[in-house]
Image (cartoon, rainbow, N blue to C red):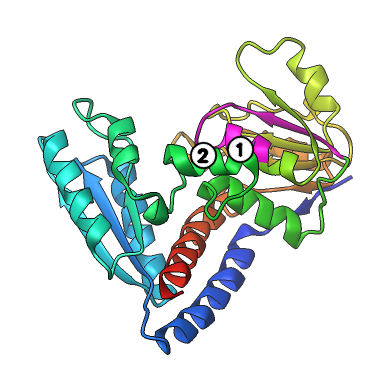
Amino acid sequence: MSAILMDGKALSAKVRGQILEETHQLEQRGVRPGLAVILVGEDPASQVYVRNKEKACAECGFYSEKYVLPTETSEKELLGLIAELNQNERIHGILCQLPLPSHISEQAVIAAIDPKKDVDAFHPVNVGRILIGDYDFVPCTPAGVMELLDEYNIDPKGKRCVVIGRSNIVGKPMGLLLLHRHGTVTICHSRTEQLADICREADILVAAVGRAGFVTPDMVKPGAAVIDVGMNRVDGKLCGDVDRAVAEVAGYFTPVPGGVGPMTITMLMKNTLKAARRAAH
């Protein structure tokens, strides 16, 4: 068996085209979606992500603002900037790039963003709304995974769904989204016993552990949909959490690069569009 590759790059382009159309419609009502991105410090990976978000804003017709602050910026100064952006009517989404310097509390920064502008969906209010199934925004990577499943007509309903990883950004919300779609969900982590046995039961397997090649072919049920959320660099090359040989066992497989990655920023654009649409109403 050779898996069907789930093309996140093509789906991302398709969704961004739809977003651009909706942006033009909103502009006719006097509203242009606006995103503010804040970067504190000089982390190279974060700089790349911020540039990609600027590019995505341009593709989707959004207004964007970028704030690059020095590493020594105080928590008080950063919270002051966020307070200003909360009141700025041109800005519908606020994103503060993580990680932050160690002297700044990530939780304090996340909590300071107006939940209506929290397009990362990290604010406790939005996390709570995801838990009860009444949400506007979803963290971008899990949202991108769900979009890929839908594009390839993979319905979680009644399926065994296994998520490896329990982060607040991916693992936990991923499990909740699959649960809301009537999947039977198991979340695995570093303390899970018989991990390989559990993974072999999965019809949908999502790997989000941050360890290159962690999921091997012997851990995968033949014909399963395997979603690789990992972004690792080995010898300068980008690779995922799933060994590429898994594609010979799985029914569906997301490559790295080109699978989930392109969808993450596209879902950020989709969340920002939702925020602007709500402001227009």
For the residue pair 101 and 122, the one nearer the viewer reads as 122
Dots 1 and 2: beta carbons under 8 Å? yes
Tag 2: residue type? Val
Specify whether 10 is left or right of 67: right
Q: Is residue 212 above or below residue 67?
A: above
Q: Is residue 25 above or below residue 115?
A: below
The residue lying furthest to the bottom in this view is 28
Q: Which residues are magenta?
A: 159-176
Residue at image mark 2? 127
Residue 60 is situated, as x and y percent measured from the top left of the image, at 44, 74
For the residue pair 111 and 272, the one nearer the viewer reads as 111
Specify whether 233 is left or right of 50: right
Specify whether 271 is left or right of 82: right
What's the residue at 62%, 19% (across, down)? 189
Is residue 16 inside the magenta stretch?
Answer: no
Residue 245 is situated, as x and y percent measured from the top left of the image, at 74, 36
Residue 115 is situated, as x and y percent measured from the top left of the image, at 40, 49
Tag 1: residue type? Leu
Is residue 166 inside the magenta stretch?
Answer: yes
For mark 1, does the 10 Å Cα neighbourhood hold few (<14), some (14 to 19), or many (20 or more) residues?
some
For the residue pair 143 and 213, the one nearer the viewer reads as 143
What's the residue at 58%, 26% (across, down)? 166
What's the residue at 73%, 44% (across, down)? 180
For mark 2, does the 10 Å Cα neighbourhood hold few (<14), some (14 to 19), or many (20 or more) residues?
many
Q: In the rendered structure, find residue 69 and report the number of the disc placed on it.
A: none
Residue at image mark 1? 131
Q: CA distance from mark 1 to mark 2?
A: 6 Å
Label 1 sits on a secondary structure element that is: helix
**In which quadrant is the N terminus drawn?**
top right
Specify whether 214 is left or right of 169: right
